[in-house]
Amino acid sequence: MKPVVLAGGSGSRLWPKSRAALPKQFLSLTSESTMLQDTVTRLQGTKAEAPIFICNESHRFLVAEQLRQKNVKHSGILLEPVGRNTAPAIALAALHATLDGEDPTLLILAADHLIQNEKAFHLAIQNAQQLADAGKLVTFGIEPDSPHTGYGYIKAGLEDLGGYRVEEFVEKPTREIAERYVATGKYYWNSGMFMFKASRYIEELEKYNPDILDVCRRAIDTETHDLDFIRVDSEIFSQCKDDSIDYAVMEKTDAAAMVSLNAGWSDVGSWTSLWEASNKDEKGNASVGDTIIENTTNSYINAEQRLVAVIGLDDVIVVETKDAVMVAHKDDAQSIKNVVNKLKAEKRPEYQFHREVYRPWGSYDSIDSGSRFQVKRITVKPGEKLSVQMHHHRAEHWIVVSGTANVTIDDKTTLVAENESVYIPIGSVHALENPGKIPLELIEVQSGAYLGEDDIVRFSDRYGRVAK
């Protein structure tokens, strides 16, 4: 069994924590580890091979770093040049997995789900494998504990090899219809997890959506390897239509089967669902961080940077980050996506980035700014180096707070220690490296007429970010 972990989601309903540059699968929302890391570690105890990961190209270093932190062995990180939904992503994984003539059973997992009962999950995997070995395309149906309107449903048919044949897939229902579904005992929530032989998915995709398979085949033919990453041709893959595995294959095939799962599952698709999955006090409140809660019930409060006090409110979501505060009624938490769309339309940075931005070499935190200046706190991991670069519109002043920096300005390299500083004039070609064994922390003061991140001309970069 080869797990395929889909890590390409945007998680916009969990803004302001989840953002385009750092979506929810890379955040610690339900445990001390990130959701991606939890997805991998809960496979311990199964007969799983090293997983394949699929993610957006812009998130590749996040995936690689989080796997490194947990010492996870993997079979490669497959990069989607553009997002095209789950049917093409899984097709790339299936085609890649069969390149050497093998035909593994693929376990398709989302990187951003919560599963609290791992033993029940492992048992469901064993049951699903019997069906997959028989040529079925298996989905995992969640035993519903409420008439939830945020999930699609699966109607179970006749029993088959420890599972059920799928009688039908149905869209997200109204409350009234959901109540009828749950009352029958035959309907399950659609989890978005699957298991099947790689060859069987390819066969069924060719039968029902051959155009998707054709594009993915041509893309896989261009496969190249770069460090941990597997790349395909962007121009070819961008021609693929956007479609989910449910619409493209599962709702059409006559080989669909379902295994029931009762394991404390949640897709953590909104702040309300995160509240539902959290431990609560006697008044139904769940809180994270430095909070004071008075005369408040059934609420979720998440404080990241400072004290948050909530008084005299019921059924609310309050989330505070370094650069944004979001307050919503629990019943209207889905409308957060409308706020995100407005931020995107207005090209505000809060749509894409947190104040603290992660890079493959470390991170930077924009701690202050004005019309002609910006101050950042920069952390460079031991042994890492920023690109060799130049700016047309800004000068920079670096002050080392801790650690040691190798600073190159034009053709001169200097070792800069704690409490020392260096000045980089406009137009100078420069680079920063941490040669030490501890993180390098420095304060960067930028000054100039334009301070945007796109005023960077890269000449060389060990992370492949130089424009060709």
Image (cartoon, grey):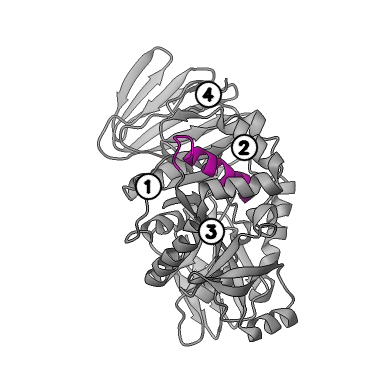
Mark 1: amino acid = Ala
Report, in whole angstroms, how far the alpha carbon at label 1 lies from the one at label 3.
17 Å
Residue 451 visible, this angle = no
Q: Residue at x 47, y 57 (%)?
A: 133
Tell which tag, 4 or 3, sits nearer the viewer: 3
Q: Circle 4 sits on which residue?
A: 466
- Residue 115 higher or lower than 95, as above or below: below
Report, in whole angstroms, how far the alpha carbon at label 4 lies from the one at label 3.
38 Å
- Residues drawn in magenta: 85-102
Q: Element under label 2?
A: helix
Q: Residue at x 50, y 58 (%)?
A: 132
* Drawn side of residue 69 relative to residue 373, left or right: left
Mark 4: amino acid = Val
Q: Element under label 1?
A: loop
Q: Circle 2 sits on which residue?
A: 216
Residue 194 visible, this angle = yes
Give percent across and percent down for residue 393: 60, 24
Q: Nearer the viewer, residue 3 or 202?
A: 202
Q: Element under label 3?
A: strand
Quadrant in the picture for residue 202: top right
Give percent across and percent down for residue 455: 59, 27
